[in-house]
Image (cartoon, rainbow, N blue to C red):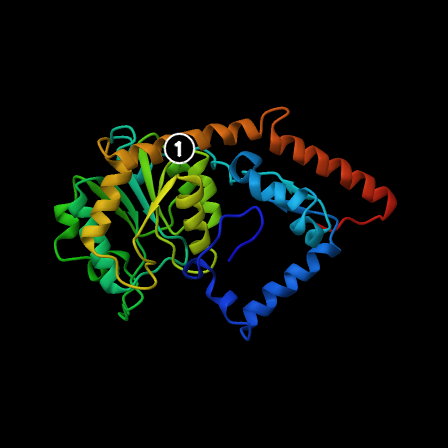
Amino acid sequence: MKIPGCRPVGADDLMETMLDRSNRHYRECVRCGEEIPMSDGVLVNTWEELQGNTLAALMEDGELSRVMKVPVYAIGPIVRPNGPTKKPNSIFEWLDKQRERSVLYVCLGSGGTLSLEQTIELACGLELSGQRFMWVLRKPTSYLGESSNDDDLVSVGLPEGFLDRTRGMGLVVTQWAPQVEILSHGSIGGFLSHCGWSSVLESLTQGVPIVAWPLYAEQWMNAAFLTEEIGVAIRTSELPSKRVISRQEVASLVRKVMGEEDEEGRKVRAKAEEVRVSTERAWTQGGSSHSSLLEWAKRCCLLSFTNNTVSI
């Protein structure tokens, strides 16, 4: 798929619903697109330094801007702020003991469940990599047991003896984890992520490179964007939704993003830090997102006087 201002996206990276015009979700996406020109503007959670070409295509006189017909305001990155300081818990007690940038954070989102086979391969790959990790684990999709005990769920979904063998190098978490606070911790050096946009922004604002593990929907396009256009991520050779990713490939990806001697890993880490700096610039006085937000606020004031309503 070719869109002005955007890197071409292969069919494998498109949302499945966009490949079937009879699909209800496809029709819903089309409806949303058709209603954009009826609004007074579009707020986008990105920033000029990250997606300058695409934003220019949307805002400047051209094919895309003629379709949009309304102003586009890039006001990102907007992420949930760190929560209030709480008493230390087991997660941060463990992270505090690790070396700087030495831990891979593994979390596939609130809906990120894997098959039992893939869970085992991911576990074995993490162990094989020899890198420290913190894994927010959800029970495999094929687990049909009745137990609600988290320890039982972990023991069912992981290889026998995994927790004992990795006790010194890894931490498995079965409860909700404060992701923003974790990614901002100095010990985190990489993020194996499903590439949901919120998680992407939370990682980039901290300069943390990504191992892209997209599962569904727009995550596939996000992964392609992060690896092929921005260069802050590495990804699996095939989509994890298409086949089981082997433990050997998992270990290789982890070593690349975390290992100091890997050339590709060095480039990805350097680019992630470069993007982190750009996120700070965007929100400084006179920065691209700061200016865009002020422009939107002024337009809201103007519209409120003329129409009494603002549609965004």
Kindly indicate the quadrant of the structure image that contains residue 138: bottom left
Q: Which sits in the foreground, 306 or 61?
A: 61
* Residue 183 on image: x %, y %: 38, 37
Residue 45 seen in this snapshot: no
Q: Is residue 172 visible?
A: yes
Residue at image location 46% in from the left, 60% down from the top:
14
Judge left or right: residue 118 versus residue 108: left
Q: Is residue 107 left or right of residue 116?
A: right
Q: Quadrant of residue 33?
A: bottom right
Name the residue at the bottom extreme. Answer: 22
Residue nearest the observer in this picture, 185 or 198 = 198
Horizontal side of 309 relative to 46 (left or right) equals right
Query: Can you say whether 269 is above or below 166 in the image?
Result: above
Residue in the image at 29% along x and 39% along y = 257
x and y percentages locating residue 21 in the rendered image: 55, 72
Q: How many marks?
A: 1
x, y percent for residue 246: 21, 56
Q: The residue tagged with tag 1: helix, strand or loop?
A: helix
Which amino acid is tagged 1? Lys
Q: Residue furthest right?
A: 306
Residue 222 vertical placement versus 286 (above, below): below
Q: Which residue is mark 1?
A: 271
For disc 1, the neighbor class at 10 Å (few under 14, some 14 to 19, many from 20) is many
Q: Is residue 176 above or below residue 25?
A: above
x, y (%) of residue 201? 47, 41
